[in-house]
Image: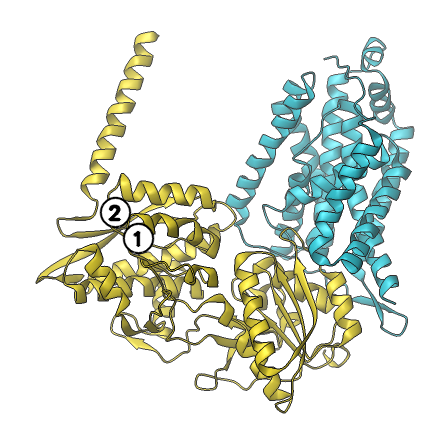
Chain colours: A cyan, B yellow
Amino acid sequence: MLMVQASLDGILLGILFALIAYGMALQWGVMNIINIAQGDLVILGGYIAYTMYLVGIHPAWGVIVSPIIMYFVGVLLYKLVINKVVDRDLFISILATFGIAIVFQQLMNFIFGADVVVAQSEYGTTMLFDNSVTLPNSKIFSAFISVLYAVALVVYMKKSRLGRAIRATAQNARAAKILGVDTEKVYAATFGINAALCGIAGALISITLTLHPYVGLPYTVRSFMIVIVAGLGNLPAVALSGMGLGLFEEFADYILGTEFRIGAVFMLLVFILVYRRFKLSKKREYLK
Amino acid sequence: MNKLVKLFITSISAITLALVSFTSSFAKVEGDYIVLGSAISLTGKYSSNGVHTQNGYNMAVERINKMGGVEVQGKKYMFEIIYYDDESNPKRAAQLAERLIKQDGVHYMLGPYSSGLTKAIAPVTEKYKIPMVEANGASRSLFTKGYKYLFAVLSPANQYLEVAIDLAVEKNGGKPVKIAQAFEQDAFSQDVRLGILDAAKRTGSEIIIDDKLPKELNDMAATLAKVKATKPDVLVVSGHTKGALTAIRQISEMKVDVPMLAMTHCDAAKLSKQHGKKSEYALCASQWHKNLSYKDKFFGSGKKYAKDFQKEFGYDPPYQSAESSAALLVFKDAFERANSFDRDAVRDALVDTEMQTFYGNIKFGPGGQNVAKPMILFQVRCKGDECENKVVAPTKWASDKFYHPIPKWSERS
């Protein structure tokens, strides 16, 4: 029963990570920017849901409100900072987003305080196998919402005009530009969509885990790992590797002990990086 | 343009110079002021508790000054504190301590917030032989290094939950119990763990789960699943506010039934407010509670302190504020008994401290820790949706009976 519990916990957590990772894969693929502030965008999204909870609105509505606000935050970030580094060295973009991460942490600390907070969904628990396996409904809800949004995004990318433009830009920015795609707009929208995905994930985290201004980094690291494993622009692979990571974490916890959980994740990252020999460092090509 | 820049630089340097000479003229004991220094976390991850600490210090300074200040050799002196923001960063805290001592000429220090930061500052104050009274570093390792100038008004971390194990054994009819524990990997929580290990050894109890939680962890489902499978008599969790909030969230979601749940940081996490009824029956270690019957002439009683604090700062004082206020009372007492501003005389007076404050009795052990004040345990109890912390141990101050065992989740409404 322990193993069933571990597997279910791992998969539900992994789906949530996969959503964050998908945002990262998207803007990494399109703009070739590794966004260190990814986790901090997630936490900001969480605080939006938490603020709603404080004023008496159910935090689950955050999965609709938070991405809308975060989309504009993302676009604004792009206009202010990212568009100045998008055609520069990869290292510059890492530095820039690292800077954004620090600014976001301090701002959240300033606005929301340094206390750890949680929003209550009051969704209850589903019991399986004569109460020996428990599944919090909030986690099931968050997995369901993640899948829903991911599917919606895939359809949007395939069918819509902007989605096609984004995919075209990802394939070859220069050619896309020659054919009349406003790449600047595409980049802004991509960054906005990524921020919106973070917003959804944040809202879900506010009801399933805890929020604190300085806990963004673990989410960045996890999504980075998932993307490394899955590759860019491959949603099923992102989803699978997200669940895989969730499972790996839970099992590492059971088998090696809780203290090695994060260590095991990092070991896995090193192993995968070496294994793939930085296959992902593809040529950068940008046009403004 | 160039001239403008030069003018700007000159004026900035002039202002800086003026400011520097201004602050150093306030240093040490100048005129009617005894100047204390403190590096404190006003930004960064400890900022909320840093502010609680600062409010506690300020409240006591104001009160002592209003009631006549400190009398040394027949003359009245007022307290004054120079604060610097250490950004919750130990390295920065150590630098600032150095700056307070060397540049600002401070001769007496008040502690920062948290064990980690106190650990960073203590070697500096020790090096310059500056007496430091601290109120927020409880880690046992602070008191085993042989520091001579460090004095803590609080009980060391290993005492936090020892009482809880004794209580569990008592409820088990004096028989040993099975303990499951999960502690964060930081100085403070690991010291709490050592206390539990001692208590387990003393009572012959068995530790069946002993998990170490990583710092950035906010998911302890794996530990709790093990708890469900092994059915211990007591579950002990300590991992600062995040640990407390995560534990309650997941215990309630996973419907983990344990007869007794003991934790730290419940009041800092505002557990009863954030989790409401889900946190009911949790047993929490605390340095202080306003209902305790200690008294002093500055703040009266704990209840009076809480009322005045509420009036001044608009919230109920957490124990971090109360212990910080007590640090100033200790300093005042030591200055008056030393009847001198000689650092070593003040240090010797601190060693001999034996007093009662609204916060508790204070007497320093050989390592500098407070040995006169026991930890208290409170239990979260709810009436309808309103939850409150009720003192349940030690029996001398208990306002309510300890509720044991915790009812099963299936029986709770």
Q: Are marks 1 and 2 on the same chain?
A: yes
- The residue most toward the left is B74
Spot occupied by residue A199 in the image (x, y as percentages of width and height)? 71, 42
- Pointer 2 chain: B
Which of the labelled discs sits on residue B35, or is there none? none
At 85% across and 39% down in the image, what residue appears? A238
- The residue most toward the bottom is B173
Whether residue B315 is situated above or below residue B255 in the rendered picture: above
At 67% across and 38% down in the image, what residue appears? A69
Using the rendered image of the protein, determine whether residue A137 is visible from the camera's viewpoint: yes
In the image, taking residue B294 as reference, residue A153 lies left or right, namely right
Residue B176 lies in quadrant: bottom right
- Of the residues shown, which amino acid type is indicated by label 1? Met
In the image, taking residue B83 as reference, residue A114 lies left or right, namely right
Spot occupied by residue A174 in the image (x, y as percentages of width and height)? 81, 11
Can you identify the residue that label 1 sits on?
Answer: B109
At 52% across and 85% down in the image, what residue appears? B400
- Between B388 and A252, the one nearer to me in the picture: A252
- Disc 1 and disc 2 in contact, CB within 8 angstroms: yes
Which of the labelled discs sits on residue B106, or is there none? 2
In the image, taking residue B211 as reference, residue B97 lies left or right, namely left
- Of the residues shown, which amino acid type is indicated by label 2? Val
Whether residue B325 is situated above or below residue B165 in the rendered picture: above
Give SS at disc 2: loop
- Between B3 and B213, the one nearer to me in the picture: B213
Instruction: Give the spatial CA distance, label 1 vs label 2.
Output: 7 Å
- Pointer 1 chain: B
Using the rendered image of the protein, determine whether residue A58 is visible from the camera's viewpoint: no
At 77% across and 72% down in the image, what residue appears? B228
Residue B236 lies in quadrant: bottom right
